[in-house]
Amino acid sequence: MILAWVNGIYEGVDAFLTGMGTTARFLVENVRGQGGATAVTRQYPQQPAEIVGERVRGHLFNKADICIVCHACDKACPVDCFSMDGERDANNKMRASRFDIDLSKCIYCGLCVRACPTDSLSMTTGFEIDPHTDAGRYLFRRNTGQLDRKLDAPDVVRMAQLANQPRESLSAEDRAWLDSVVDPAGEHLIGMYGLGYFTPEEKAKADAERERKKKEKEAAAAAAKAAKAALEKAAAEKALAAKEAATPAGRPDGGNAP
Amino acid sequence: MVDPGIARPGNDPDEQVLVTTVDEFLAWGKENSLFYLLFATACCGIELMQTGGPRYDVDRLGMIPRATPRQADLMIVAGTITHKMASRVRTLWEQMTEPRWVVSMGSCANSGGPFSKWSYSVLNGVDKYIPVDVYIPGCPPRPEALIDGVMALRERVRKYRTLGMRDRDPHVVQGGDCAFGSHPGRDGACGPSSAAPGALAMSRGDESPRTPQSGKPAQVNGGPA
Amino acid sequence: MSTDVTVETLGGERMKLNMGPHHPATHGVLRLMVETDGEIVAKAVPDHGFLHRSIEKIGECVEWPMFVPYTDRIDYVCAMNANLAYCVAVEKLLNTDPATAVQVPLRAECIRIIVAELNRISSHLVAVGAMSMDLGAYTPFLHGIAQRETVNDIFEKLCGQRLTYNFVTIGGVAFDLHKGAEAEITAFLDAFEKEMIRFNKLITANTIFRDRCAGVAAISAADAVAYGLVGPNLRGSGVDWDIRRDEPYGIYDRLAVRVPVGQGFAGRNGRVGDCYDRFVVRLLEINESVRLVREALKMLPAPVEKKTDATGGYQADVAKQLRKPPKGEVRVRTEAPRGEMGYVIVSDGSKTPYRVRCRTGSFTACSIFQKLMRGIFMADIVTVIGSFDIVVPEIDR
Amino acid sequence: MSTALAFAAIAEQVKSAHPSVEARESDNRQPWLLVPAADLPAVARLLRDAPALRFDSLADLTGWDLAKFPATPPSTDIAVAYYLHSLAHRHHLTLKVMAPRDAAQVPSVSGVWAVANYFEREVYDLLGVAFTGHPNLKRIMCPDDWIGHPLRKDYVYPQAYNGIAHLRDGQHFEDAPPRVGDPPPAPAAAAPAKPPVKSA
Amino acid sequence: MEFGPAVNTIATWISGPDPSWWAVGIGLVAVWVIPVLAIVFPVAAVGQIIERKVAAAMQRRHGPNTVGMDGILRLVVRLAFFFLPRAAQDRIQARITALPGVGWTLGLLQRSGLGQLAADGVKMIGKEDIVPAGTDGLVFRAAPYLALVGAFLPFAAIPFAQNLVALEVPVGALYVVAASGFTVVGLLMAGWGSGNKFSLLGGMRAVAQVVSYEIPVGLAIAGVVLWCGTMDLHQIVAHQYNGQWYSFLGWNIFQSPFLALLACLLFFAGLAECQRTPFDMAEAESELVSGFNTEYSGLRWGMFAMAEYSEMILVGALVSTLFLGGYQSPIGEPWIMSLPGWLETIIHAGILLVKFTLGVVLMVWIRWTLPRFRVDQVMRLCWLTLVPLCLLSLFGLALTMLLGGLAGGVHTGPAYGRIPGMQHINLDALGWLVTWVVPVGFAAVLVAVARRRHGQMHPALKQLTGGA
């Protein structure tokens, strides 16, 4: 029993000394900057971030000029962070008139990039909100949640200054500039900090404005669609009448059989 | 509650040399010593852990983790908040002492992220329960992004005024439909005051809803309905 | 022997203590409702669901390949293994019908083994590090994290993410190995083995640590099986069972997996199946994983240009099969770091799964908590939770 | 030497003791045993204790709602599946119990395999199958006051929990699963919310 | 009880050759408070930075190195040039920073983490100080003060220099132990008053632990008292001077292996008394969230931190005083004694500062190496290991003195300082050698036998730790 007690003390002292020796070695190596225990710290804000590899999935970026609005990314996305509209350009090619990526929902999985047929969609190599590699900041709207626009560094500074001042104290020029950079409807922004939010009446106004525009657009689209449909219907009836006149039996499957 | 946006005597920096100077000094301390609450729920928690680890070492920036909310200045909401968890997050936030800040880290805390569409149990954005100062995108955000978010938060902390008027209260609830907090102007979720047009002017800079000593919100507008 | 006091001899008045859901030692948002008499725990009832994110419901809503990112989030500490489990399950489902059979290229299989075992290393590093941190030793934890960063770097070069990889896909892997990956991995393994010896000197051999774990919450082999423990927790109780060896998936049958089991490593005070055994089994598994990565690197076939090539490719073409997979159900078990990660997949023949069920190791590990946490010290609760290496999203999903 | 038995042999043994058990096969030829709910405890005990079977571990217990499954004949039952594994003999078996949708009740096997306690609580929570004889049949994932069982195919998503709306405003859910009413588009024109539909 | 010479000097200086009681009181407070404020307080504050820097170095990090003194500099500039506009003040600040040497100094302060310390302190002052509902208000509020008082009281009897000691208590060693026990009242009150079960558990653990570890502390001090024949700390220090240039050989710790062992035991028991890892069960972060100070915020929490670090310093100072020659330099005293009195005081205090700072560093080092004990292990360690070892050492020490006296190895050493004619027990070289070789050899044999009998290690563990 006494021997076990002695052994216990020995083991304790041994483990204590071994542990202290190990940490001491770490300490010495760290201070001297050599060996396996050199400080591995990347002093990020003071030193630039090291992004390793070329496959880094930063945030999504769409080259609008080669996007064909095929909705492949939309279909591949598990969280539905895309919403897009397309229109035909002069060469009758589909081009994105609106391409919104809700980066507050994006999970950076890269499935959309793998699905993209034209390589227009890519992920940046900078990390999510890297101000160093992006040389500026991407602005994200909070509630409508989309990548809004990119600001260059001086603009970022100016905006942060302006947005953190009471709005009433801004000059008209500054206020106009601020409104031009930041959508007043986006209540506040992801990725851009210290930015203000806007008074509810401003938001209500902006909402109403947007709603009005949307309704107008919808109404216009509906009218156009109705007109087009009427036109098409007339044409189809005409064609059908012509067809029926030509082949009395008609095809029951409407010409869709393989 | 006064609107600090309107210039009035005593609110001008040059008029209160001593107060603003001391305030600036106090804000310097707060900015450089943000102890964060060890609060992690999901994936972002691992990244938060690694940010505290040797590679990214937020201790350099004066940030050390504290286990108890009483001693923490900053709550980094790292991970998904479910409906079941949300009231606990609120409790934790209430237990933190002023001045306190909240960083929402990652898509889940920002807006529900991958779970925003199909999930029945995930809270779509932690700002429905607590006011958030900085949102960091990412799923999970890289440690650099987290540090970047903290640096941006520090810009905000720098403007915090202990003694003088605050230019802008950082604790106005910003979220869409927060049932708590003091944001009166949103969708009727925060009491009837939103209907009165006069009340809207207060929303910009109203004081923190907490009395200095109580540690509890002085007024809780609404609550679990 | 943790205590001489049994629950039966405790006094009548007990204190109810609520640990969690926010508590430093519960590894996330687990809640334990503890009844104690002073320092002795009379009863501890776990409460789950604080991170129930309805991932299984999401599995019924999204298409087959779109569920892979969600498996990352089921177990983010070893996302590669989680991806792998789901993909193996879907491949098995496709293979039940010859019309939709899919042949994963050999190179992809090797890459899968490499990433899965590397991720097992980094996951076990978090496990052992977090356990030592729970017991008050912070330095080993940070050294574990530092090693994990290197693995993260490798993965980041491989697939661009540090934590949620979405790398293993149905029918292969998303990318081929990046340039210089083999050398990088070998260099990491060499440095890592040396580093682990120091880690073990610092914490594993420490008497305080050993005595705190020895004999605490020992689980007999029969109990471990009955309570559905899996993985290192089961092997810690001396049950020789490893899915990689006994029901191999992928090309694990070509690698001779050696399975460490608990033997009462703590010596005098230790018993088979105590917390220390679970801890040491994880460390031994790390060594085994290092060996497996090396072997898989040796087996790696040369890359070829065509990515669907049966040997040198990395991604079989499965898009067509996934639009109309066979109707039916399939169950697959894989060995993740936290034990069996089993998928039950029910398909109604459409492009969306009918039911995706993920059986995880941490969930069943929690079922034994109530039995273990009787008559131990308050401080032992932390040891027990740490020794099971629970990851809360895996419990709640 | 392997003592593992094939499915047919296991089925034979079980059927000889319990004739009501049927051997079935799923559409992709995965065999399983259909056990009537009443016989389940006895079958479970037999499977665990018979020396040639010795299914000592319940590897998984789960279930799914067959309401939308294109089976022939169509069924609206809840299938509860037991995946058994024998560490002694290294063989597998799948059991299934069909529980009627409206009164889903299955006897508990938590007395046979201890781990079934948790599994059954989960199935109860998510699929609404009541396990009779379970020592502590409470919700395990969802809060106790949660309405409905989420993994049922007719589950209706909640519009709000604890007074907090489930959706963010500005979110679009054209093809999202059905929810109890939609969030009112604007406070001024708040449409009366539909009464919550409680799933069975 | 008698007051230190400095107290008398000050009292005399205030109210004449026969000082009145209030003058003595002022002198006492001055002599007690000055070293506490000037030496202990700063080191206790810097201890937190030492802690963070040492931990960082062991963990491959840098520790706090970004926060400089710019905030303080700005405050100073703003206040000094208050009449100038802000932009001008900023320009002045930039100028000052650009001055040769200033920038370098500021950088050093930044890298060493002292700026961080300032920032932490400033923040803590501005932090909301709440008394949560459900607390026992008075108890809750009073607890930090009691803890702090308990941490500072013992310093009254610690001799920082020959004449820098407030209380020359004849039973100084006893006083230190008794006064430091005061802290535990604070901890218990904190645990009870918080109205938090984790705090209560923490407070109870603290009490159980501190009260138990008073025993080994007392026994270890008893060994020194036995050896030196006095309980006056000042005389114990004086006793350790051998008059040679290698005066460190006269320190108690080198006199006998038993004294060395007692020094280690005192250090560890002291570690337990100030609730440091591996004995920090009262504050166990991963078990009891933050233990007794879970509910404390702001300055009150800062007071607990201060008390903790002060106690660490106390342990360091006590071990130095009892075993490491106190304020004496290790290379003889004449070069100090020849200096003017004030300089001598400063140098002596500085030497003690270095010694106890090394003790603090050692404690920090231990903290970041070892895991935490469990409650029963702590108690077992105390009652089954430390106390028996203390008793054994005491016995061995007494035996050494007896045999040494019989062999004539004990003789009177040279007088030192202002206490003439002290009776020294001072062994000659041969006696010293025998004193060391015999017990150490016996212990080595015992350990070898014990290892052979019980010291098996599982082969898997051997493989994990590098096959050794």
Image: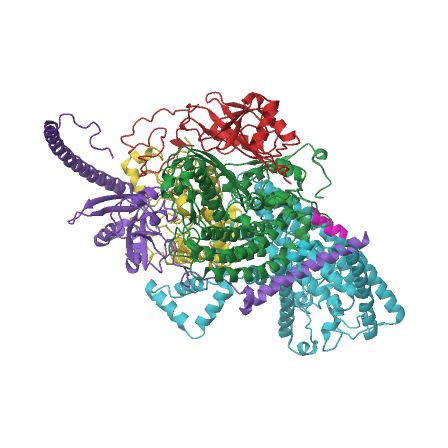
B90 to the left or right of E415: left
Residue E348 x, y percent position in the rendering: 65, 71
Chain A as rendered: colour: purple
Give the answer, above or below, for where E269 lies relative to A145: below
Residue appearing at x 61%, y 55% in the figure = E308
Chain D as rendered: colour: red
Residue D28 is drawn in which quadrant?
top left
Chain C as rendered: colour: green
Let me know if residue D95 is in the magenta part: no
Q: Is any atom of residue E88 visible in this view? A: yes
Chain coloured cyan: E
Residue A19 x, y percent position in the rendering: 64, 60
Q: Which residues are magenta?
A: E376-384
Q: Is any atom of residue A164 visible in this view? A: no
- Which residue is situated farthest in the right direction here? E406
Count of marks overlaid on the render: 0
Chain B as rendered: colour: yellow
Considering the image in quadrants, where does the C terminus of chain A appear? top left
Give the answer, above or below, for where D151 lies relative to C109: above
Nearer to us in this view, B90 or A47: A47
Residue E267 x, y percent position in the rendering: 69, 59
